[in-house]
Image: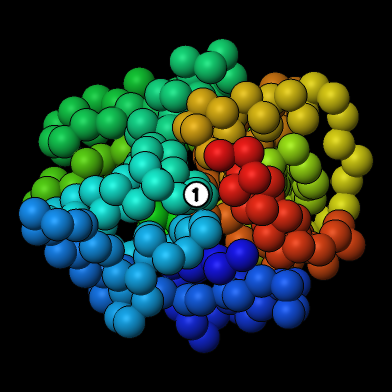
Amino acid sequence: MRIAVLGSASSWYVADLQRAAGDSHAIVPITYRHLHSQVDMHSISLDSGEFDLFGCDALLVRSMPPGTLEQVIFRMNALAQLAEERVVVNTPRAIEIAVDKYLTTVKLREAGLRVPTTIACQTAEQAMESFLSLGGEVVVKPVFGGEGRGITRVADEAIALRTFKALEQIGAVIYLQEFIEHEGCDLRLLIVGERIVGMRRRHPSDWRTNISRGAIGEPFELNDDLVQQARLAARSVGATVAGVDFLPGRDRRLYALEVNAVPGWRALSRVAGVDVAAWVIEHLQDCCENR
């Protein structure tokens, strides 16, 4: 297979995929910046640099960089165009849903999964009312973002008001979730087609449990209920490769927090002792064969 990987050519995941592919498949990194399409009466082309995307067997989306509204819409439309004729994982629609924390939370709730009480608004006044209704302690998150960037825990009215006013001034959606008391760890489950693996992420000194922020990955044994909930979460956004995050609260309830449609796997692969890159390639091959 010729597999185009939408991401950085110098990234660890491209190197890992190339290692796993060996001589059996060609891994070709491409970038959003160089996406180019030509439409005329004879044909429609789509390329990145000198690489013809219609000449690949599958495309794996491994990044979602910021851009202007026009750039984002063009990129998604170009991927949707490609997905009509080639395998694209994850699909443009799955990427659009998963990158949006608000929409993902709605989809998780509609799927019947337990989510933290969440409020999205656009004014500081609305946000202060929401802050008080959630008990005066909330987690403020950017609607778009990952790896714990921009996430803040606020438990002081004065700081909350300054935070909400600053977000209102820059035209941000103010996205608040109730703070769930927990034991300093969460669960990351990685789904690759029919396969699933998981790890516990524990941080000794921070309530945020992202590996990128210094959390420690630990193995743990999956049970049928957790596997079922993780698959339900991935299906709710339409992703076949997904990282699903769950938070076990001190109230003994399990909260679905997020679905990542471009999940990292380096730490999880090491902790669980599985070759996730090989799983991804085999999944792409299965998708091509079953298309």
Q: Where is residue 34 in the image (x, y as percent from the top left)?
A: 26, 75
Quarter of the image that includes the C terminus: top right
Q: Which of 177 and 73 is in front in this view?
A: 73
> From what the image shows, is residue 253 above or below residue 163?
above
- Quarter of the rendering containing residue 232: top right
Q: Which residue lies furthest to the front in this view?
A: 42
| Residue under the image location 66 percent in, 71 percent down | 25
Total labels: the figure holds 1
146 over 21 or under it: above or below: above
Foreground residue among 255 and 153: 255
Report the side of 145 relative to 166 (left or right).
right
Q: Where does residue 73 sit, x and y in percent of width and height?
A: 19, 51
Can residue 186 be seen from the camera position used here? no
Q: Residue at x 66, y 53 (%)?
A: 285
| Residue 280 visible within the image | yes
Mark 1 is surrounded, within 10 Å at the Cα level, by few (under 14), some (14 to 19) or many (20 or more) other residues, namely many
Q: Name the residue under label 1.
A: 87
Tell me how the rendering is colored.
rainbow
Quadrant, the N terminus: bottom right
Q: Residue at x 77, y 30 (%)?
A: 227
Left or right of 205 on screen, residue 101:
left
Give the image location of residue 176, x and y in percent.
36, 36
Residue type marked 1:
Val
In the rendered view, tell whether residue 88 sits above or below residue 212. above
Query: Along the horizontal axis of the image, is 167 left or right of 143?
Result: left
